Image (spheres, grey):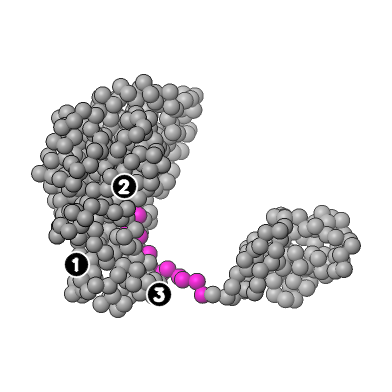
Amino acid sequence: MKELPIHIQLDPKCSKTLYEQIYEYIREEIRAGRLLVNEKLPSARFLAQDLQVSRTTVDMAYGQLVAEGYLTARPKRGYFVSAMENLYTMGTEFRAGKPEEKRVDVQTDICRYDFSPNVIDMRFFPYATWKKITRNILVDAKSHMFALGEPQGDVELRTTICRYLHGSRGVNCEPEQIIIGAGNDFLLLLLEKILGRHIRVAMENPTYVRAYKTFCSFAYPVSLVPVDEKGIRVDSLRRTDAQIAYVMPAHQYPTGVSMPIGRRMELLKWAMEAEGRYLIEDDYDSEFRYKGKPLPSLQASDTAGRVIYIGTFSKSIAPAIRISYMVLPYPLLEKYRQECGFFSSSVSRIDQTILDEFIRDGYFERYLNKMRKQYRMKHDLLLNEIRPLEKSFHVTGGNAGLHILLTDTRGRSEKALEEAARTQGVKTYRLGEFRMGDCPASDKTTEQNRFLMPSTMILGYGGLSMEEIQEGVGILKKVWA
């Protein structure tokens, strides 16, 4: 039985009758949205006992609410909150000394098509397989499964990840170099302990905002380095005094640039030029490449132990998995054991065992192949649908990942393009949201630095169906052409 979230405080000395106080309290709870549609209220008998009033008093209050349409009486079931459209009140009420803004009758924006670059398609996730693995593991679970595991993660999963990374990304490592954590944020927190304080970090600009904010939260000074069509500009990186460079060579986010081997060698050379320099390689979605084979990792070309490799299963499996991994060079691994070896693993051993079996038994590879096919079809459909817009936009970022970029050639601002789409129920994303701070004027004047210029929109397609892509782009063609 549903009890009201806040007990009604009846005042016998109030000029209003008891039934009016009950009526007004429930009415305001409904109008304020604290009682939801189809939510069941206590029975008249129960509420009368709770408030220590006669049942007739409660019946009168409920009867008035039913008459006004706030409640619906269902025979032998009770009273339920009615569905009401365009309900609003004017002005501001004060409760407990705090002003509370009342809802106004304003049509809210309805986003029918969300071209988010961060959403993946979960409709094809093998739920039955995941449930079966989970059930089998729990049935056969021994006491050690519920004991505290190794700080770096279970060796079985680390071994499986090691084999997977070597086969798919060319990463050269041993299981002892891998640390498993609940998301990249946790791994970056560990890195802050390993690398120490007052470390200057260089980041691509535009960049992954979450990582930028994480480094800022460490009080790390951050140098923003522009990106061209080959990735982070090493000549600009050299003009900083950074000791760490955070890069995304396989598929830079959000520009979609893939770093060629020449630029990778420049980066590795920069890292080897001074003691204590490292590259953090964020390989967040390298599994999704639609032309040719996935590019090898930057770590695969590292012979001096200067690359810290970070990956995640959030894009390739599901965001809720919250399992990421980090490969540390041996010098940093020793520092990890000294400085962070006492931290417990942040991932449940049961979740680690499920993922280990999911990968080892081939389910992960089959699921990846299915999703590559699905995303490739969406990718090709989107590029085909936006072809009429190529008269007004320069299209980049295709053939990998889950989003593309459209750079306006008619001088319109990102906000104007975003607003035009939003008013028609289409949510798009501005590249400007990923530009952090500013960069030197000398970098701005370089013709290659188009990613520092305005009017570039991002269209993600991972979470949309084929029909939604067609319909959403159909609207964009009308408002952006």
Q: Are marks 3 and 2 in contact (CB under 8 Å)?
A: no
Identify residue type, mark 1. Answer: His
Task: Give the labeled residue for mark 3.
Answer: 423
Image quarter hosting the N terminus: bottom right
For discs 3 and 2, the disc positioned in front in the rendered view: 3
For marks 3 and 1, give the CA distance.
23 Å
Q: What crowding class fits label 2: few (fewer than 14 Cα within 10 Å), some (14-19), or many (20 or more)?
A: some
Q: What crowding class fits label 3: few (fewer than 14 Cα within 10 Å), some (14-19), or many (20 or more)?
A: few
Q: Which residues are magenta?
A: 107-118
Residue 157 in view (yes/no): no
Q: Residue 243's quadrant in the figure?
A: top left
Q: Residue at x 85, y 69 (%)?
A: 16
SS category of the residue bearing label 3: loop
SS category of the residue bearing label 2: loop
Question: Magenta span has 291?
Answer: no
Q: Position of residue 166 (x, y in %)?
A: 21, 34
Identify residue type, mark 3. Answer: Thr
